[in-house]
Amino acid sequence: MIGPVPEAASGDNSALLARKAVAATKVRVAKMFLADGWLQTALKLEHRPGQERMARAVAAALGNDEALIVEAGTGIGKSLAYLLPGLLLAQETKRPLVVSTHTIALQEQIFKKDLEICRTLFRAVPELKPFADFLATVLVGRANYLCPQRLARALQTRADLFERALHDDLERIVDWSLKTSDGLLEELQPPPHYDVWEAVNADSSSCNPKTCSPDTCFFQRARSRVRKAHLVIVNHSLLFSLIHAGAGPETDARGILFPDDFVVLDEAHRIPETATDHFGARLSSFGLDRALHALYHPKTRKRLPRPTRLETRPHPRHDRPRRRQTLF
């Protein structure tokens, strides 16, 4: 599923420039995908008529501010059919492209394989060389990142935070933190105990731009990459989690996650299930047990501090700018 791009501003040259950019993109996309086009002559890839039709349709939909749903069978080469037009338009119009997938496997294919094909093509064709230095990044939920500041605090208070049996997990995280470049939980095998990771990950208000720097904090570094990227790759779960949390531009601005962005939903047949998970309500015995232990843990005898005063908070709908700053 392809999301529409915003309408160009009127009253100045921006509308004319946008129309020229769209027209140029359509011409370049045609040159890429037609028989004996750049994909064949520069990269020796086979011509796929279905891929060509899809690429032309994507370029037209994005350029004409229209939604598009494509059913693409196996072997069509759908990733290149939306990545190449999307990357050209993202750079020509200075609007970020968001690609959302359901599976991690497809995310890795896009980031490690398909984008390299795009970059190789851009470098091989003189007319496309200005687009070769595009910036792309993969964004995962902030709970997947290690926060060094929270790790240091957990080390100082580990006797109060954890049972003795969990201290080895904390030490293992410390050793790993000195070697990792991304600070992602998936790198740490076997994964640490849930309670230990909960105390050191970036999913906390204490991990914020005021207290954590991109120079030292893995999540803040990832945020910095996202703000500069032409292409941001997410999964459906994170996309709908961010939307549900109030992420995105302010109410009067157009966009899904960023102002003036456009979105590609790959594996879109999984969207209804994912959206229901995030916008519905669910109660489980495990979740109830964790909530009760947060109030009072019988083993550690730690309890939730008694509130000293009540605070009034604005409704999430009226709190969007503040919430967006904590997410991006």
Image (spheres, rainbow, N blue to C red):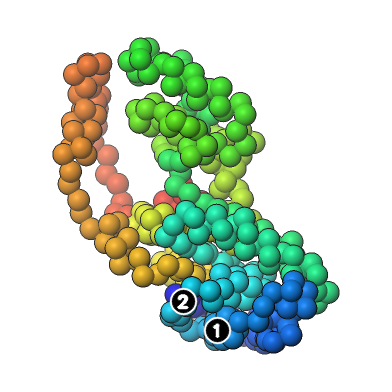
Quadrant of residue 37 within the rendered picture: bottom right
Query: Quick one: 106 or 251, which is closer to the camera?
Result: 106
Q: What label sits on residue 228 in the rendered view?
A: none
Residue drawn 29% across and 63% down?
273
Point out residue 38 in the picture as x, y percentages from the top left corner: 74, 79
Label 1: element kind? helix
Residue drawn 43% across and 79% down?
71
Mark 2 or 1 closer to N-term? 1
Q: What's the amino acid at mark 2? A: Gly
Q: Quadrant of the N terminus?
A: bottom left
Is 38 placed left or right of 314 in the picture? right
Point out residue 150 in the picture as x, y percentages from the top left corner: 47, 27
Q: What label sits on residue 73 in the rendered view?
A: 2
Mark 1 burial class by Cα count in 10 Å: few <14, some 14-19, many 20+: some
Point out residue 42 in the picture as x, y percentages from the top left corner: 78, 74
Q: Is residue 202 above or below residue 256?
A: above
Query: Quick one: 55 or 66, which is closer to the camera?
Result: 55
Residue drawn 40% across and 70% down?
268
Residue drawn 41% across and 37% down?
204
- Residue with the mark numbered 1: 50
Query: Is residue 218 at all visible to an observer of this figure?
Result: yes
Contact (CB < 8 A) between labels 2 and 1?
Answer: yes
Furthest-right residue in view? 126
Q: What's the amino acid at mark 1? A: Gly
Total of numbered circles in the picture?
Answer: 2
Q: Is residue 290 above or below residue 169?
A: below
Measure how far apart labels 2 and 1 are at the Cα level. 9 Å
Mark 2 burial class by Cα count in 10 Å: few <14, some 14-19, many 20+: few
